[in-house]
Amino acid sequence: MSSDLMSLLSLGSSALAAANSGVAIATNNATNANTVGYSRQTVDFESNLLGGVTTGATGRDASALLQQRIRASAGSLAHSSQTQASISDLEDTMTTGGSIDAQLSSLFSRIAQASASPTDATLRAAVVQATRDVAVGINGRAAQVASARQDADVRIGQNMPQAGQLALQLADANRIVAKSGDPAALDHREKIAKQLSAFVGGSARIDPDGNMRFVLDGGAVLVDGTHAATLQTSTDPTTGYQIAQVVDGGTTRDVSAQLGGSIGADVTFRDKTAKTTADQLDQLAYDTATAFNAQHSANAALDGSTGNLMFVAPTAVRGAASLLAIDPGLDASSDKLALGSPGGAIGDNSGGLALFALSTTKNAVGGTRTLTDAAVSIIGDLGSAGAMAKSDNERDQIVDEHLAGLRDSLSGVDTQEELTNLARFQSASSAITKFVSSINDMLTNLIDRL
Amino acid sequence: MRVTDHRIVDMAAAAAQRNQSSVSDLSQQVSTGLRVSKPSDDPAAWMTAQREKVRAALNDGTSQVVDVGRERLVASDGALSTLASIISQARDLAVEGSNDTIGAPERQDIATQLYSLFDTAVATANTINADGEYLFSGNNSLTEPFDVTTGAYNGDSIARAVNTAPQTTQIATVPGSTLTAANGVDLIPLIKTLATAMDANDKAGIQNALGGFVTAVRQISLLRGQTGARMAVLETAKTAHDQLATRIQTSISEGVEVDTVAAASNLAKASQALAVSQTVTTHVLQLLDPVK
């Protein structure tokens, strides 16, 4: 008889422990209801063959597939957000103040006006000033693009080491997860992986040994088990920009083209979007100087001389935008403005008419566009890229929001649910306490009678 | 499906934020009057508008050129009108001087008047335009076209064309060569010749000069007709410029400017949606308030 009472007491003890575990889990869940990245924890109870209950390991409500999608979404969202921000900033900068197309059309207008009165010093000076404005305008835009690229480069230099730190933390988190299997450690690892994705894109998978392996889209492994590669940058001797590198096992790889996330967005902006704009500006500057110089040098200046330039002749397309400058001779004297034709009288304006005709001649981009149209297209192309980035970002935000909803429905904490569980476990705990108390009374009576 | 408090608050906040963003965008549109304020708002519309602005700038430039051309032709026509009047007076004096009833003293008086008319004609033909160029010197625009002593022409015969549009030019000057024998008679020297003959009481010379005045009157009349025709062309060009400027402005407005009524209506709707979402958010927060 006493033996049975003892087993009943033991049974009550295990039940009390189980109820207390439930209370602890529900309390922990409720406490973390607003903790970002927290996955709701669960506890399993199993009935023993010989009676009583066993408390299983603490689990968590999470889906590996969903987490993988969330990490990928974090990379995409960070990429499109950074792309949109960079392009939008450059677009705002480049549309503030006088546009190049307006400066070019102003130059053409001034030429037309001076051609109507080719000896008028005021009108000639206005053409010279408009020429200066075009050169300074293109210089300014080139500087703005260079500055935007430089800003992106600085961010790459700052963010790569931060991503490297996250890779180290992820490797460390693998170590902790392998050691403890704690659900909180798994959440922590997810959080780090998501942050790393936001920086570099890429993908992570859970290996059979439970470790998270993080790989860039181009195949470079950043984290493998408890080992993390080093992420660094080095200066490209040709461009002066930072090259994103992964150093692993003594091997250094340029991973600039493999990067997604915000760093990948900066690389793409610096090396493609803004570079395209810079190249277009160089081409426009080159085409402008070449077209005007060709006609102007064939014209006759006020003193009858020919061969005068309007702009300093560019030696190459590359860098032409930042080097574009008014010809020093013309800058010094508007008498060098050539609006006449060789051998013509002082009031001859046929050269001026020919210069003005450049406004409708396709001299830019390999003879496919007029100079003003090419100038419009530069900002237009940037605007198209900005619109696309905006659209991508809106899409990514929707996806991210949707995934956040899915995650919340699976892994989030509903405080009402947890309060209900808490009440349930507390109720069970009270009942078991009474049960144990009754058994204890019975046992005490039995001992007293002996 | 589990819907957490966190999720409910997030959804309410996101809805409010979206509506707030809509209100912000629409407010900006209504206040600036622009649907497209930067290229990425609508790249195609922005580029179209920008190209139209380039057209407008070129149109404005050539419009000013047309104004300059018109003013020059008006000034030239004024000078030609004066010259026509002088020629007419000179011819009348020639007729008077050719009359056998008058003698040498009267002819000398007439000669004095003719010398004066000659000086006036030369001064008129040597008129300087507002831009500092001589009206009638052709492309030798800084050279005095008519010799003050002989009335001989020193300019060239080139009429200056100006751009009335990017690919269109129109003559906007009258070279003094049109007042020379190349187009009839040497108008101004003819006055001097008549004055000299009158002064010398040379009846044959007077008769000879008188014949030249018949041609001169026709010549200057024809020239004024040509000048008037050129002015009419520039007037037409000016009208075309004004119309094009209006069309371009309309095109730009349609492309990038906002339909004020539609924008105001949309703003009202968005404001209402924002107010509703804010109310919902407040309600949700009250529902989830654990203290309550």
Image (cartoon, coloured by chain):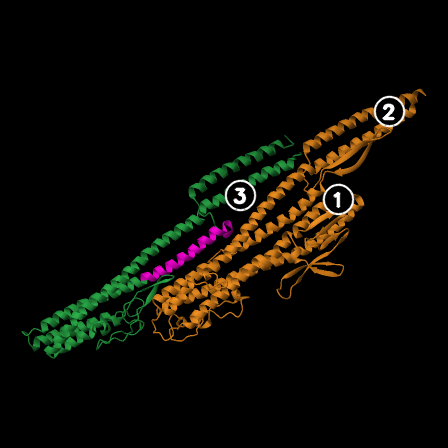
Chain colours: A orange, B green
Q: Quadrant of residue B2?
A: top right
Q: Label 1 marks which chain's residue? A: A
In depth, the one of A123 and A73 nearer the eye is A73
Of A356 and B270, the residue lying toward us: A356
- The mark nearer the N terminus, 1 or 2, is 1
| SS of the residue under disc 3 | helix
Q: Is residue B44 magenta?
A: yes
Residue A79: assigned label: none
Seen in the picture, residue A271 relative to B259 is either above or below; the reply is below
Q: Is residue A88 visible in this depiction of the protein?
A: no
Look at the image and tell me in which quarter the C terminus of chain B lies: top right
Residue occupying the far top of the picture = A449
**Amino acid type for the residue under numbered disc 1:** Ala
Residue A129 in picture, x, y percent from top left: 42, 65
Residue shown at the point (21%, 68%) measured from the top left? B220
Q: Position of residue A99 (x, y in %)?
A: 47, 58
Q: Quadrant of residue B181?
A: bottom left
Q: Is residue B249 left or right of residue A420?
A: left
The label shown at residue A440 is 2
Residue at the image position 39 percent from the left and 53 percent from the top: B248
Q: Please, which chain is the residue tagged with disc 3 on? A: B
Q: Is residue A366 left or right of residue A410?
A: left
